[in-house]
Image (spheres, helix red, strand yellow):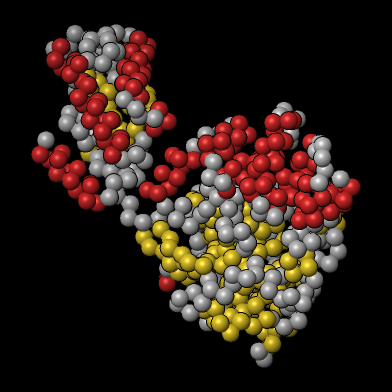
Amino acid sequence: MRDGNKFFAQAAYVDAADAYENVNNKSQEVLQNLGDSYFYTNQMQNAAEVYELLFLRHEGAVAPEYQFRYAHTLMAAGNYVKADELMNELTGENWDHEEFASQLDTMVPHKFKYDQVMNNQSSSDFGIGFYGDRVAFASTRNQERPVYPWNKLPTLDLYSAKMNDEGEMSDIVLFSDKINTDEHESSATFSKDGKYMFFDRTNEDRVKNENDVRVAHISLYRAENVDGEWTNVEKLPFSSEEYSVEHPSLSADGSKLYFSSDMPGGSGSFDIYVVDVNEDGTFGTPQNLGQAVNTAHREQFPFISDEDVLYFTSDGHQGFGNLDIFRTEGDFSEVENLGGSINSGNDDFAFVIKENEEMGFFASNRRGTDNLYQFTREENEIIEAPTVTDETSGQDIIPIDGSKIYFDFDKATIKPESKPVLDSVVTYMNDYPNIKVKVESHADARGTDKYNMDLSKRRAASTVDYLVSKGIDKVRLTSEGYGENRPVNDCTEPNMCTEEQYAKNRRSVFVVSNNKGSMNKTEMDEDMEDQEEN
């Protein structure tokens, strides 16, 4: 136990796990540290087993961060049902992986095809970047470097290489000692003219973090290319010995530098920041990208594309497990997971892309160690579900025969003649599983305003209940009653119209509240032909 605690405090997690495994009667602290030691070295199955034992023995006394990591180990193992339960309890939100993954399939703008980069299988490689007609990447392949206690691998150095269309690296060259040291160097990004290079390097001194563990934080550096040699290496002024700044990405025009940091004042753990790079080479004040991007957990590895799309990794937004790759653009107010064609239950990160060529690279430890992958992407053809415009409200409604159901006077029960229409709504929602529907219900003008409002709400509720009874998930349905406020004719007062005219206002309408379908084009064409025949 003493050895385990010593190694754990040094972040020597491989040695810590070996020591803790030899403790016979494992206390709560030992189980926590052992689970974390496996988690931080990507031994997810082992970590899941230890965390499970931890919660079986000490449920109610375990801090939330262990439940968070336990859930991610389960996602890595594909046990999303149990992971959803843990995340729902932890966040108070609705984590439903099956629904989440299904919706993404019909919403993400691209699908990805990828293969592992050749000549990188024997070492831990990641953090690839575009470097003129070459690539730059970080690797543990230099056996002359000191062994890093965390994972028992040599410290990281930066390399450059040629990369062919088949994803095979050649002419692999180590950057000079002006760039590489016995500390970690990684995540290189370059100005368009090749004159400047930004990268990160681990600080030599270790300081205690909030968990009383001594860690070496990471700083950002800039180097200048003079006559083909990298020189004038300088630490950026917003780096620190007290926190990390890492994973730089320079915008195409060189005016902004994006990076990740756990500096004070963030949302928690690592956040994504941006800083202005002035024409004279000085820097502005780093700005946090805000809560739409950043969560209480890790946001790292930003990459800003030539089209100003920001890609980054996170384990705080809902995903497939551990670090996933996300995208955001414009004012960065909306974040989108790139989907299951590229993300896995393990760490997927360090995404870079040439948008105009629809190709790029990312890193993943889905096969046990960090490896590089080359990808191509193609448009994900998203077929919108067919709708028609409601003549009264101008809203998009479901294009079924009749498109509405009607109610008897002063009643909220479903009439037998309405059931075929409702069954058609069920068929439509099953055909387009990403569609959400709002049921809007109405009353005629006879009765008080309050009574008619309550009556219309009951009609909306009975309509939703019928759809749910036929298997439609209630989360896809909302309802609202409008009383007598939206008549389809001029029958706005009692005793001014015939019963047949009043009856037209006693209705429920099916409004499509989003429009991302999931049928392929052939299915959609056949569906539309059937509707036309009917």
Measuring from the top left, give residue 223's x and y in whole percent. Answer: 71, 78
Give the quadrant of the N terminus.
top right
Measuring from the top left, give residue 426's x and y in whole percent. Answer: 28, 30
What residue appears at the point 72 percent right and 45 percent down from the top-left corner? 35
What residue appears at the point 68 percent right and 46 percent down from the top-left corner? 47
What residue appears at the point 70 percent right and 36 percent down from the top-left corner? 53
* Front residue of 508 and 525: 525
What residue appears at the point 57 percent right and 59 percent down from the top-left corner? 367
- Is there any visible trace of residue 295 in the rendered image? no
* Front residue of 189 and 115: 115
Measuring from the top left, give residue 279's x and y in whole percent. Answer: 65, 75
* Front residue of 178 and 139: 139
> What count of labels does the image hold?
0
| Residue 90 sits in quarter | top right
Left or right: 403 as drawn, with respect to 377 = left
Measuring from the top left, give residue 263's x and y in whole percent. Answer: 74, 54
| Residue 144 sits in quarter | bottom right
- Is there any visible trace of residue 151 in the rendered image? yes
Q: Residue lying furthest right in this view?
A: 2
Above-or-below relation of 221 to 519: below
Give the quadrant of the C terminus.
top left
Above-or-below relation of 279 to 246: below
Above-or-below relation of 366 to 250: above
Q: Residue lying furthest bottom in this view?
A: 227
